[in-house]
Image (cartoon, helix red, strand yellow):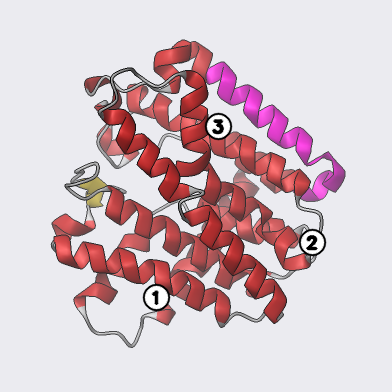
């Protein structure tokens, strides 16, 4: 786990440096809010990009632009998700949310600009043009109505639905809202190498679902100071979650099974995938 945490911190440092560098000449509040929004996270999505690239012989320098891109997309989604008309949160990553640190207009524009910056970063990266196009198109699909935005829309609709979501509906919702970007990150290395992406797709699907189950567990067991955001909101709102359907112990067992399936999918990569296996285990053992 020590090797994994060191690798995670290294990639997070590179991605944050890359985003800051891209915005270093922009002396306006929107740019400052963009940098602020990308700071302080775990950087898991960028880490998955770099590690999946390494499995295919692609060096970190070539993978970092795509890692920066996915962290920009993730940050934009959080900025907008935290706003009053969405989840209305005041705290993110232990700090005031962007609309609290600045204002609603700056938060909207910062999120919009982060999304645009993601594709700029990929476009100016060092990969061959056909690989940059493949990354861009697949990222657009993962972030859009077929992925994250579609899942978020389902989540919002569920808040006013007459009946709570079934377990199967929650799985489908989270495959978009949380899973699509994580899955893209895990497949990015194969996309860069124009290689078979199926093993990493299976890994990403399972890790993405385990990640959301872990979030539901943290909403019950965590505290705001450690998690870095409000907790207990799902139960307070009467929201259907993995925990409400499976119980706390059942949710933990389901998450552990998903991690085992994710690790099994990497068998063809041998010891080279050990860091990704550690990452999968971290997803369900994290405290924030």
The CA span between labels 3 and 1 is 31 Å
From the image, tell me which residue sits under label 1: 20
Quadrant of residue 99 within the rendered picture: bottom left
Badge 2 or badge 3: first in the primary sequence: 2
Residue at 21 percent across and 81 percent down: it is 28
Q: In the displayed structure, does residue 267 sit left or right of residue 48? A: right
Badge 1 or badge 2: first in the primary sequence: 1
Q: Nearer the viewer, mark 1 or mark 2?
A: 2
- How packed mark 1 is, by other alpha carbons closer than 10 Å (few <14, some 14-19, many 20 or more), is some
Q: Which numbered disc covers residue 56?
A: 2
Q: Secondary structure at mark 1?
A: helix
- Taking 28 as reference, is 8 above or below it? above
From the image, tell me which residue sits under label 3: 210
Residue 24, magenta (yes or no): no
In the rendered structure, which segment of residues is drawn in magenta? 252-273
Residue at 31 percent across and 23 percent down: it is 239
Q: Position of residue 187 (x, y in %)?
A: 67, 54
Question: Considering depth in this image, is 281 or 69 the residue closer to the camera?
Answer: 69
Q: Which numbered disc covers residue 180?
A: none
């Amino acid at each position: 786990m020590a090797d994994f945490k060191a690798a995670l911190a290294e990639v997070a440092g590179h991605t944050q440096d890359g985003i800051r560098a891209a915005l270093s000449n922009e002396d306006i509040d929107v740019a400052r809010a963009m940098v602020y929004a990308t700071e302080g996270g775990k950087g898991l999505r960028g880490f998955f990009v770099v590690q999946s690239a390494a499995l295919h012989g692609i060096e970190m320098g070539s993978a970092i632009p795509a890692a920066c891109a996915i962290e920009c997309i993730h940050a934009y989604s959080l900025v907008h998700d935290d706003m009053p008309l969405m989840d209305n949160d005041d705290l993110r990553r232990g700090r005031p949310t962007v609309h609290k640190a600045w204002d609603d207009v700056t938060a909207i524009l910062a999120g919009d600009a982060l999304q645009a910056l993601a594709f700029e970063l990929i476009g100016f990266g060092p990969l061959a043009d056909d690989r940059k196009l493949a990354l861009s198109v697949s990222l657009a699909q993962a972030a859009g109505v077929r992925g994250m935005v579609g899942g978020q829309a389902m989540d919002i609709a569920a808040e006013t639905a007459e009946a709570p979501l079934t377990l199967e509906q929650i799985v489908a919702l989270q495959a978009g809202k949380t899973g699509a970007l994580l899955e893209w990150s895990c497949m990015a290395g194969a996309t860069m190498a124009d290689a078979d992406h199926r093993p990493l797709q299976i890994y990403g699907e399972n890790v993405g679902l385990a990640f959301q189950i872990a979030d539901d567990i943290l909403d019950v067991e965590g505290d705001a100071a450690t998690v870095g955001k409000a907790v207990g909101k799902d139960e307070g709102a009467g929201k259907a979650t993995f925990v409400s359907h499976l119980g706390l112990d059942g949710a933990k067992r389901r998450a552990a099974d998903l991690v085992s399936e994710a690790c099994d999918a990497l068998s063809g990569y041998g010891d080279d995938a050990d860091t990704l296996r550690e990452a999968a285990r971290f997803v369900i053992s994290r405290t924030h």
